[in-house]
RNA sequence: GCCCCCGUAGCCCAACUGGCAGAGGCAGCCCCCUUAAAAGGGGUGGAGUGCCGGUUCGAAUCCGGUCGGGGGCACCA
């Protein structure tokens, strides 16, 4: 006896992969239609679904599988629902690891990079992600980074890019400066070494100019972006309301401006503090205090960021030998230099009000400075308790402002300062300008030439792209010098302006520049007349869905929002926010521990794929919980996913050709209820619950085949086909295979999302719960459209209700037809 | 220190605007098939929602407090 060979008799998740990859490729299933045309010849509305692009650090890992399983489910759902979907892929392929790998192996960084890209592309393909591959690009391609340079020059022309000397975060191991966002707890995000402060001349983008708009425009994102991300951005921007106050300094022509959130406490300022590492401290220091100050400053500069950030360390500082004059009281107060005041926040100087600010109080107590209460808060005396009185209260010891409440006094002092020309109400932000220079090789060269006579000169647009040198450079970091500096032939150029000998800027751009606009280029990655094609951007953007990790909350997402606003102001895009909706997927962890390169990958994606197949891995990821939750691989069961997919596969083979007619009504009702449910859940991105509904549908159909109306009932076929169509969002290979086993020669990808017959959702009877004092005492089968009166009578007639009432009278009956009646007994 | 989110069966998770606490999975238990064992198929028990209080006819859901967990910002004036 031999089995017929046309259909295999067991589900093999691996054997079905190639077959459908070829079928999809041949059909061009995932190509967006009309990338640039605003005409919509097929009438399908466009929908742009973007996942954060991939960094080619090696092969794909579990985290990639998580993100792209989610975005692919969105994309496939949208396609089934009749949208023209653009689901693009690209690579964020500049960056440090390529260089590190390169000098470890003595290779060109591009070799490692493009090898990894090739490997990832093939892994993506085999995972069955429905990308439109024609959109593909890599940020390390000169055709792409050319436009980084173009944008840089555009921002430069509009005073949004500038160079200045600034204290910067310097990583001694990676030998480069780091953005604020790349410093975690005083350590380099990448290598973990202690970050040092260095004073270097660096390029910046003026993100701070957009601080208020970045805050205001969050109104557009409310409810569409995760709350958590919006909160993180708000914290990061750090808006702070208060006043600028100008203090005259004895022996200095110009007053010194400070910022305070508590101008109401101005009369309580008993000393003045300047950041020890600010130029101002150096300037204000008198000769007879010079030696003491220099010693102190040396000590401050030697301390690491870690030491600086310990908030419980004692306050230190030195008197500078000078006095400042309180602009309202005229009081003369001493000026100190201390390291608890930060040079780069506000103006780098403060008025110190020890009675009402904890830090100032700590310093005053350490230095024996006076503490004067100016707001009566009812708290114990700060000078004795050591606890500043930060509460609300009424002003005292404050001249004309005595008796005002704290809030009124904030306004009144601000107004008075303005009248006197000594200050005004103002707002400051924590958000700083974006430091984008990197002393690294594998990045976009900055298109500026430094000429001894002309200064900064732009590389002419027709010379772009300014390519990286291909030889003559030394990759290894050498004491803070950029690798590009060693490429002498590349660096030495004639000045485009005067023709004299000049030198190229040798820094490269932060890779976050690359990723802050890539989503604009996908619709036309070959566009040559600008960074992005206006027609494509008009057609697809802003992106309908953006999916990626929340670790990018204050970095990439903020930069992308900033750049979009800048481009809007320059008239290049017609919107101010790039991503309409945002989904931030959780991490894949193992037994409570994050997986990372340093800790070793506890679970390897390729192993999982080899064991369970791409569909089961995808289903496992999505079924584990809500997309934004972490997936603990120790809590989930890829075996269970394989089991379910096998059940669907087997069912698809068991369903026979249908008899005529609509089929079993009870089965149809269950099927349509589940389709309806799954549809709503899918629209709300409740992917884990959708899968639960599909599992339920699988069981319904299994029972219908085995012990219900049977395999040839039309309702069973209808249900099986609906199941397989919905399944194609999550397990595309299995779904195609099952669709074919159901007798179709077309692709399930083109079959559409099942329609719900709403007539089938109507129930003939429904269960009404009858409560007494909120506790369920009886259930009644009633018509769904039963009138309230009738239902009330029915409920009151119930013997179980009477029993529960125990003879007590009825004080009230709440009727919520048709589902619920609550009988409230009389008290007593 | 300031701010945000979350606590539901042994575990992961459901429960539409307050209205029957359980959809799904894992593990467990029972049965069937087969077996050297397993895989496979079918079935099944199990929590009153961290804790205290409030609002309400009715609270997992709203409010206040508290405990526990996770996260963001942080000498930011």
Image (spheres, coloured by chain):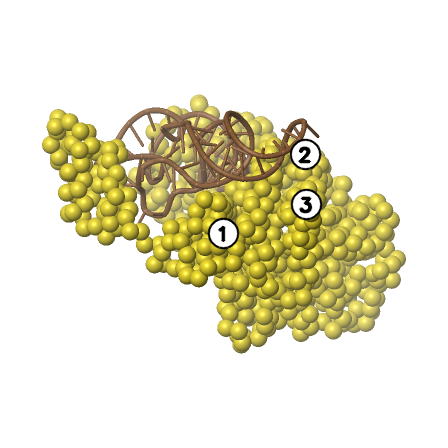
Chain colours: A yellow, B brown
- Disc 1 is placed on an element classified as loop
Q: Which mark is residue A200?
A: none
Q: Which label's residue is closer to the chain start, 1 or 3?
A: 3
Q: Nearer the viewer, residue A828 or A236?
A: A828
The chain carrying label 1 is: A
Residue labelled with disc 2: A303
User: Of helix, strand and loop, which one carries label 3?
Assistant: helix
**Mark 3 — on which chain does it sit?**
A
Q: CA distance from mark 2 to mark 3?
A: 49 Å
- Residue A474, relative to residue A638: is it above or below? below
Work out whether residue A637 can be spotted: yes
Same chain letter for marks 2 and 3: yes
Residue A651 horizontal/vertical position (percent): 54, 49
Q: Nearer the viewer, residue A649 or A349?
A: A649
Residue visible at 45% across and 57% down in the picture: A714
Q: Residue at x 85, y 51 (%)?
A: A107
Q: Could you tell whether A687 is left or right of A734 in the image?
A: left
Residue underneath mark 3: A609
Whole-angstrom CA distance, mark 1 to mark 3, is 33 Å
Residue A77 placed where, x, y %? Answer: 52, 58
**Can you say whether A288 is above or below A178 in the image?**
above
Residue, disc 1: A711
Labels 1 and 2 within one chain = yes
Residue at image position (15%, 38%) is A797
Of residues A757 and A199, the one drawn nearer to the viewer in this rendering: A757
Q: Are marks 1 and 3 on the same chain?
A: yes
Do callouts 1 and 3 mark residues in contact (Cβ within 8 Å)? no
Residue A431 seen: no
């Amino acid at each position: 006896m031999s089995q017929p060979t046309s259909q295999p008799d067991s589900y093999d998740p691996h054997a079905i992969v190639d077959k459908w990859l070829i079928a999809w490729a041949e059909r061009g299933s995932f190509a967006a239609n009309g990338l640039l045309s605003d005409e919509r010849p097929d009438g399908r509305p466009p929908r742009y679904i973007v996942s954060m692009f991939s960094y080619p650090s090696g092969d794909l890992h579990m985290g990639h599988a998580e993100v792209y399983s989610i975005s692919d489910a969105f994309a496939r759902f949208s396609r089934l629902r009749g949208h023209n979907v653009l689901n693009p892929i690209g690579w964020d392929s500049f960056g440090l690891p390529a260089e590190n790998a390169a000098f470890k192996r003595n290779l060109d960084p591009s070799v490692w990079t493009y090898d990894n890209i090739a490997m990832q592309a093939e892994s993506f393909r085999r995972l069955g992600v429905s990308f439109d591959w024609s959109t593909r690009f890599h940020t390390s391609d000169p055709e792409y980074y050319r436009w980084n340079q173009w944008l840089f020059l555009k921002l430069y022309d509009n005073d949004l890019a500038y160079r200045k000397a600034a204290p910067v975060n310097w990583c001694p191991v990676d030998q480069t400066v780091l953005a604020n966002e790349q410093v975690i707890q005083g350590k380099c995000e990448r290598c973990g070494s202690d970050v040092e402060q260095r004073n270097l001349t660096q390029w910046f983008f003026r993100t701070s100019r957009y601080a208020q708009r970045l805050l205001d425009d969050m109104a557009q994102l409310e409810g569409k972006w995760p709350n958590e991300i919006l909160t993180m951005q708000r914290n990061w921007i750090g808006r702070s309301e208060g006043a600028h106050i100008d203090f005259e300094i004895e022996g200095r022509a110009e007053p010194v401006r400070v910022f305070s959130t508590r101008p109401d406490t101005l009369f309580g300022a008993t000393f003045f503090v300047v950041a020890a590492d600010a130029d101002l401290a150096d300037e204000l220091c008198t000769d007879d205090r010079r030696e003491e100050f220099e010693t102190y400053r040396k000590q401050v500069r030697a301390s690491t960021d870690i030491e600086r950030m310990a908030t419980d360390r004692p306050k230190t500082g030195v008197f500078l030998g000078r006095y400042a004059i309180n602009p309202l009281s005229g009081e003369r107060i001493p000026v100190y230099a201390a390291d608890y005041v930060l040079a780069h926040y506000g103006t780098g100087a403060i008025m110190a009000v020890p009675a009402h600010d904890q830090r100032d109080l700590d310093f005053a107590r350490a230095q024996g400075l006076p503490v004067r209460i100016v707001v009566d808060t009812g708290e114990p005396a700060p000078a004795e308790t050591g606890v500043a009185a930060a509460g609300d209260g009424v002003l005292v010891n404050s001249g004309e402002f005595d008796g005002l409440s704290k809030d009124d006094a904030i306004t009144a002092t601000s107004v008075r300062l303005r009248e006197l020309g000594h200050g005004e109400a103002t707002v400051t932000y924590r958000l700083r300008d974006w430091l984008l220079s990197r002393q690294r090789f594998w990045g976009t060269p900055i298109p500026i030439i430094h000429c001894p006579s002309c200064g900064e000169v732009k590389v002419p647009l027709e010379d772009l792209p300014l390519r990286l040198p291909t030889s003559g450079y030394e990759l290894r970091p050498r004491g803070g010098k950029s690798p590009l500096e060693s490429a002498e032939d590349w660096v030495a150029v004639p000045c485009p302006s005067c023709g004299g000998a000049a030198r190229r800027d040798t820094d490269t751009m932060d890779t976050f520049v690359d990723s802050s606009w890539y989503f604009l280029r996908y619709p036309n990655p070959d566009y040559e007349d600008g960074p992005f094609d206006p027609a494509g951007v008009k057609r697809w953007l802003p992106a309908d869905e953006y999916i990626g990790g929340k670790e990018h909350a204050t970095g990439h997402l903020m930069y992308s929002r900033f750049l979009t606003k800048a481009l809007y102001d320059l008239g290049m895009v017609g919107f101010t926010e790039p991503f309409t909706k945002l989904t931030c997927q959780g991490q894949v962890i193992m037994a409570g521990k994050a997986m990372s390169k340093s800790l070793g990958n506890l679970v390897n994606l390729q192993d999982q794929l080899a064991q369970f197949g791409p569909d089961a891995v995808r289903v496992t990821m999505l079924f584990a919980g809500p997309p934004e939750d972490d997936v603990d691989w120790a809590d989930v069961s890829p075996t269970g996913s394989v089991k379910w997919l096998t059940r669907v596969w087997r069912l698809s083979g068991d369903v026979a050709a249908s008899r005529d007619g609509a089929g079993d009504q009870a089965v149809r009702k269950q099927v349509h209820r589940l389709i309806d449910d799954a549809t709503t859940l899918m629209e709300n991105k409740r992917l884990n619950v959708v899968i639960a509904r599909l599992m339920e549908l699988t069981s319904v159909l299994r029972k219908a085949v085995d012990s219900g109306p049977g395999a040839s009932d039309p309702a069973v076929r209808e249900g099986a086909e609906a199941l397989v169509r919905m399944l194609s969002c999550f397990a595309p290979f299995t779904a195609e295979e099952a669709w074919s086993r159901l007798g179709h020669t077309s692709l399930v990808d083109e079959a559409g999302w099942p329609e719900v017959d709403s007539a089938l959702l109507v129930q003939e009877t429904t269960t009404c719960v009858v409560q007494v004092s909120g506790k369920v005492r009886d259930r009644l089968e009633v018509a769904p459209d039963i009138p309230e009166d009738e239902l009330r009578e029915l409920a009151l007639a119930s013997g179980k209700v009477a029993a529960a009432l125990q003879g007590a009278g009825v004080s009230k009956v709440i009727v919520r037809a048709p589902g619920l009646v609550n009988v409230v007994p009389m008290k007593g």
